[in-house]
Image: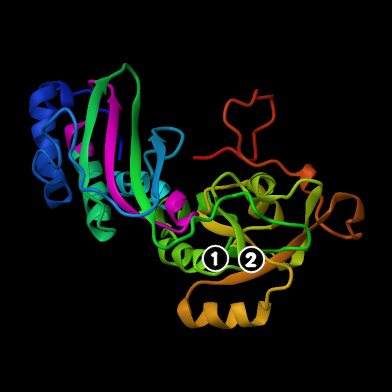
């Protein structure tokens, strides 16, 4: 669905800012509490929280993270789910969200309504109150940025650092083919899985796979080590290949390091009891960079997605939607 309209009567400019905000409040419905705990004041009032607090922010931008082939309701849901995936990677759960909307005056009011209704449905599903936000006009732009607040589900928050030489590398789900399959907006954030993993001491480091495994693994790799991956073990999404699994991104799966001495079979057995429908795969381990065995994947030959990278004449294989 095209988000822009040439008919002024159908655009957000026909509503004006005050009416648009009133519409947004109606579109969100029960996903947004009444002021001062939701939309309506300069700031939202949040209840005091226990434990460690988490915060993350991610946008969706028309032409980058979604296009006309993505239904507006799915684009709205993707905005929240991208942020939920970040919380999942640290074993957290969501508590509240605020949204900043930047849009051209020619954006269709009907498109925007469906966007917010999709966001609201996703917020209700994951019990995330939308407590505030902002609307700003910018020519030729349609983008939304969501800031998500959360808290740890247990005594430990799992960060990207913490892996050691010899640790095993695991990944949930399947990788690659995110754009062609529609997974990039149909995915389910691994909140329950992330919280489960955070409670296991053997899990030393974790993150979500959003920019491609080849790039994201660098953030988990201990100093002086390199990921020793077996390409035949990568869990490929239908229609994908090793290159796609390593570079395409927007998989929103969890990749994590497990202590070298951990009981791998027992971990896999416990996992499959807890999450029988979610695949878990050990794809390699972190080894000293100077002692890598022959036959492993050379990750420095693969590139994931990077913002602001100079673009050459060849199409970037890691470019997102």
| Residue 248 locus on image (x, y percent) | 60, 47
| Residue 233 locus on image (x, y percent) | 72, 68
84 left or right of 201?
left
Residue situated in front as seen by the camera: 164 or 140 = 164
Disc 1 and disc 2 in contact, CB within 8 angstroms: yes
First-in-chain label (1 vs 2):
1
Query: Pointer 2: what residue?
Result: 235
Residue found 25% across the figure and 21% down from its top: 136
Instruction: Give the Cα separation between the discs numbered 1 and 2.
Output: 7 Å
> Is label 2 in a helix, a strand or a loop?
loop
Residue situated in front as seen by the camera: 265 or 111 = 265
Dot 1, how many residues are within 10 Å of its Cα: few (below 14), some (14-19), or many (20+)?
Answer: some
> Is label 1 in a helix, a strand or a loop?
loop
Q: Is residue 129 visible?
A: yes
315 left or right of 185?
right
Residue 105 counted in the magenta span: yes
Work out whether 61 lies above or below 49: above
**Quarter of the rendering containing residue 227:** bottom right
206 left or right of 287?
left
Work out whether 78 lies above or below 62: below
Asked which colour scheme the image uses, the reply is rainbow
Residue situated in front as seen by the camera: 40 or 212 = 40
Query: Pointer 1: what residue?
Result: 173
Residue found 78% across the figure and 43% down from its top: 300
Q: Which mark is residue 100?
A: none
Residue found 39% across the figure and 33% down from its top: 62
Quadrant assignment for the N terminus: top left
Image: magenta residue range: 85-112
| Residue 258 locus on image (x, y percent) | 66, 65
Residue situated in front as seen by the camera: 44 or 64 = 44
Q: Is residue 15 visible?
A: no
């Amino acid at each position: 669905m095209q988000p822009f309209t040439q008919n002024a009567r159908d655009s957000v400019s026909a509503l004006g800012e005050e009416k648009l905000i009133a519409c947004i409040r109606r579109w969100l419905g029960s996903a947004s509490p009444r002021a001062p705990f939701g939309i309506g004041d300069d700031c939202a009032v949040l209840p005091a929280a226990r434990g460690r607090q988490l915060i993350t922010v991610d946008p969706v931008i028309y032409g980058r993270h979604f296009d006309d082939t993505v239904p507006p309701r799915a684009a709205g849901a993707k905005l929240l789910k991208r942020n939920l995936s970040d919380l999942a990677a640290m074993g957290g759960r969501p508590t509240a969200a605020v949204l900043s909307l930047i849009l051209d005056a020619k954006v269709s009011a009907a498109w925007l309504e469906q966007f917010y209704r999709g966001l609201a449905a996703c917020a209700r599903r994951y019990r995330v109150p939308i407590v505030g936000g902002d609307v700003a006009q910018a020519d030729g732009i349609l983008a939304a940025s969501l800031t998500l607040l959360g808290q740890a589900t247990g005594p430990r928050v799992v960060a990207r650092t913490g892996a050691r030489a010899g640790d095993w590398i695991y990944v949930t789900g399947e990788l690659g083919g995110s754009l062609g399959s529609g997974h990039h907006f149909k995915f389910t954030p691994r909140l329950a899985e992330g919280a489960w993993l955070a409670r296991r001491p053997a899990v030393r480091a974790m993150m979500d796979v959003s920019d491609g495994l080849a790039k994201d693994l660098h953030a988990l790799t201990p100093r002086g080590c390199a990921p020793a991956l077996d390409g035949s073990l990568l869990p490929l999404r239908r229609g994908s290949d090793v290159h796609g699994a390593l570079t395409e991104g927007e998989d929103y799966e969890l990749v994590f390091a497990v202590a070298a001495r951990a009981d791998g079979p027992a971990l896999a057995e416990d996992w499959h009891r807890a999450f029988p429908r979610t695949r878990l795969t050990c794809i390699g381990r972190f080894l000293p960079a100077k002692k890598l065995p022959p036959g492993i994947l050379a990750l420095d030959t693969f590139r994931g997605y990077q913002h602001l990278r100079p673009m050459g004449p060849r199409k970037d294989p890691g470019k997102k939607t």
